[in-house]
Amino acid sequence: AQSVSQHNHHVILSEAASLELGCNYSYGGTVNLFWYVQYPGQHLQLLLKYFSGDPLVKGIKGFEAEFIKSKFSFNLRKPSVQWSDTAEYFCAVNAQTDKLIFGTGTRLQVFP
Amino acid sequence: KAGVTQTPRYLIKTRGQQVTLSCSPISGHRSVSWYQQTPGQGLQFLFEYFSETQRNKGNFPGRFSGRQFSNSRSEMNVSTLELGDSALYLCASSYTGDGANVLTFGAGSRLTVL
């Protein structure tokens, strides 16, 4: 069965610090990869996605993620975080026609 | 265009009762998925419906059920509520539910079981 692991449960950063959130998945076939974000009091929304092609994908608000197939990883990065990036971040994966499986989430707190 | 609408937004029930939650997908979306969100567990997949048929199912007991209507609106029902069912229930829709479709989420229905 597919599974998604997010090793960082809670990350605390100061503004302008760099961010990297880890995501690993277990599935041997072709997968689609996503990062979703949930800002306080708001809907879960898509941050970025990878289906195929360039393994480095760029999303909204300066976020990017790199798909490394050999490591089954899809880590999220941002060079300089802002206070407004405070949110919960979820990595998710699915196979071509299967359900979307989410990780347990990483809570990011950014202090000014 | 209107987003995914979930009702009710908040509800409080007692153990043993049952609850029905409703989800109206984005117009044109035919796939509806349901997730349970709890602190520390993240989002756990309940089930997915497409064209009134349950296409995928998660590992939840039979107390959790759902259905989809011909207009793609979906409902989920939880019978014999337990304290552990307290959670945010999220509905998400997409055009076809295929892997490359992006899910659009609603605001959720927050259920508290006392």
Image (tube, coloured by chain):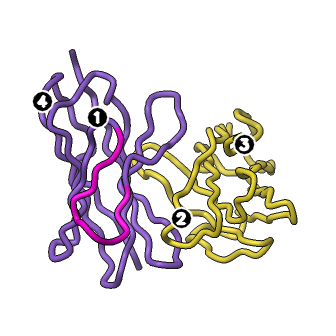
Chain colours: A purple, B yellow
Mark 4 highlights which residue? A17
Q: Amino acid at mark 4?
A: Ala
Q: Is residue A98 left or right of residue B18?
A: left
Report the quarter where the C terminus of chain B lies: top right
**Nearest the camera: A85 or B108?**
A85
Callout 4 secondary element: loop
Q: Spatial distance from mark 3 to mark 1, Cα to Cα?
A: 27 Å
Mark 3 highlights which residue? B6
Q: Is residue A16 left or right of residue A44?
A: left
Which of discs 1 and 4 lies nearer the camera? The answer is 4
Which of discs 2 and 4 lies nearer the camera? The answer is 2
Among all residues in the image, which is located at the extreme bottom?
A29
Mark 2 highlights which residue? B101
Q: Spatial distance from mark 3 to mark 2, Cα to Cα?
A: 20 Å
Residue A49 locus on image (x, y percent) = 38, 58
Magenta residue check for B88: no
Is disc 3 in the same subunit as disc 1?
Answer: no
Q: Which contiguous range is marked in magenta?
A: A49-60
Mark 1 highlights which residue? A108
Q: Chain of mark 4?
A: A
Residue A67 locus on image (x, y percent) = 23, 65
Mark toward the start of the polypeptide (1 vs 4): 4
Q: Is residue B53 left or right of residue A8?
A: right
Callout 3 secondary element: strand
Disc on res. A69: none
Q: Chain of mark 3?
A: B
Q: Amino acid at mark 1?
A: Leu
How crowded is the residue under tag 3: few (<14 C-alpha within 10 Å), some, or many (20+)?
Answer: many
Q: Is residue B31 above or below residue B82?
A: below
Which of discs 2 and 1 lies nearer the camera? The answer is 2
Residue plotted at (61% across, 48% down): B90
Residue plotted at (48% across, 44% down): A45
